[in-house]
Image (cartoon, rainbow, N blue to C red):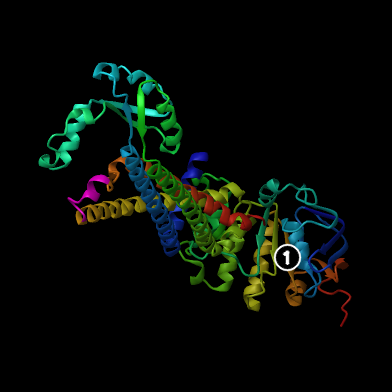
Amino acid sequence: MIRMKNVTEVYDSSDTVALDGIDLKIDEGEFVFLVGPSGSGKTTLMKLITGEVRPTNGTVIVNDFDMSKIRRRKLPKMRRTLGVVFQDYRLIDNMTVYDNVAFAMRVVGARNKDIRKRVPYVLELVGLEGREKRLPNELSGGEQQRVAIARALVNSPRMLVADEPTGNLDPVRSLELMLLFEKINEMGTTVLVVTHEKELVNALAKRVITIEDGHVISDGMDGYYSYDLE
Amino acid sequence: MILSRSGYLIREGFRSIKTHAFMSFASVTIIMACLIIMGSVTLLSFNIDAMIQSLEDRNEVVAFVDEELTPDQAEALRPAVEAVPNVQEVFFMTREEAMDIFMGKYDAALMEGIDATVFRHRFIIHLNDIAQMAQTKSALENVEGIAKVKAHLEYASAFVTLRNIFTVVALVLTIILVLVSVFIMSNTIKLTTFGRREEIAIMKMVGATNSFIRLPFVVEGLVLGLLGGGLAFLVEWGLYTVLVRRVTGAVVGSVITETLLSFIPFSAIALPLLAAFLAIGIFVGVFGGVNAIRNYLKV
């Protein structure tokens, strides 16, 4: 669940206004695409959600945590309600597939018994059964991204946030990944995908929020760039 | 849960030493090198200090007793002499004993006809602090029955100056070495953790607390510090033993060996040295590791 009210983000270092008066509402169980050209403010919006930056003005609420006021000590607790997936996978190179996923559970203090039960289940869910003992660099890009998704899902987060998850993948792998996100969403997790891949967005026919120059310029069910500028 | 978790974190620390073997090796080596240099300077300064101390102890003040007094009367002055401030030890010597020692040093034929009355009864006095020799000398001269006091004031002041200079030099050297060591070590550890920025960022992203991220680094720092400290101790031990043997072996039998080169045996300093090495090793390892990742935790 995300609530943003009149959110402004100004970067001190360059005086750049990345976001300007954003209002946003995403409810539990939704599947939302966040689209927009480079430099539109998508990444800043993501960083507000993950707590990497704080809003200059306005209110950001993510899974009941007020991100404008949250204490640094509370951030880990907040982040455990989120599963985050990045364009570059961000796996730990010297850990096996299994350990990369199990690691996220160890971080939250899960018992070994639970880890042994949960990790194989999630790996199967993302279609990586039999790959447990591999190292990340022995896998294809699509498979690596699935490991990252398994890691994001393993603690049953309330929301999955993916920042350009298909940026390094070919169209077929990209579509497969989107279908996996759809499956995850159908199991009850809120999904927010940041992308600029028009075909994918239109193929899935979900809610699409478009931002440009730090403003929300459209929000609806009618695909990428509903009011196409071109 | 706590137990299984700390077990995991400790294993992580050891795993990390293994996966970052070269950096671990570099850290241990640097810790070792710095400790050996620091330890050697300290041991050297201890030994030189002990030698100066023993030389000081030989520097005695002689208080001659009034010629009119009988040996018994002279010896009765002992409590008054002992009561003088800064007096550590007092030996009484009769004029006959003094003559025997004097004659022993020279050819007996040369001394023919000399009789004990030329000498006086005397007290041989050792002082606590030779820096105050002048004051003690005049205090002794004021004791009733003491005729004259002989003290090598110029030696005393030379020793005091020597010791003062040496203390300052050793202190300055140690401070410089500590600063240099801390600088080198913290940079080495920074280098070892630089490659793990990404790993830490990932941990933060999945909701790891700072203490969870830190603990493996603490374990790692502890192990590397202990290793560095322990190895440095062994090397220092070897160095010290070989050096002492070489130096004393080279000048054996000479006057210098007997008077100047009285080395502190290694066994006497082994325990405090080991404790200091391990403590510094652990401190530098743990503090260096935790300090080096501090910046990466601010995500």
Q: Residues within 10 Å of mark 1 (few under 14, many from 20)?
A: many
Which residues are the magenta region?
B251-259
Front residue of this view, candidates B109 and A98: B109
Q: Is A15 in front, or is B63?
A: B63
Q: Residue furthest left?
A: B109
Give the SS element for disc 1: strand
From the viewer's perspective, is residue B39 above or below residue B79?
A: below
Does residue A157 appear left or right of residue B98 in this picture?
Answer: right
Residue B1 appears in view: no
Residue under label 1:
A193
Please give the name of the residue rendered at 33% of the width and 45% of the height, measured from the top-left corner: B51
Q: Is residue B89 visible?
A: yes
Q: Residue at x 55, y 57 (%)?
A: A101
Q: Quadrant of residue B265?
A: top left
Above or below, A222 against B114 in this view is: below
Magenta region includes residue A159: no
Q: Position of residue B58 (x, y in %)?
A: 30, 39
Q: Is residue A213 left or right of residue B299?
A: right
Quadrant for the C terminus of chain A in the image: bottom right
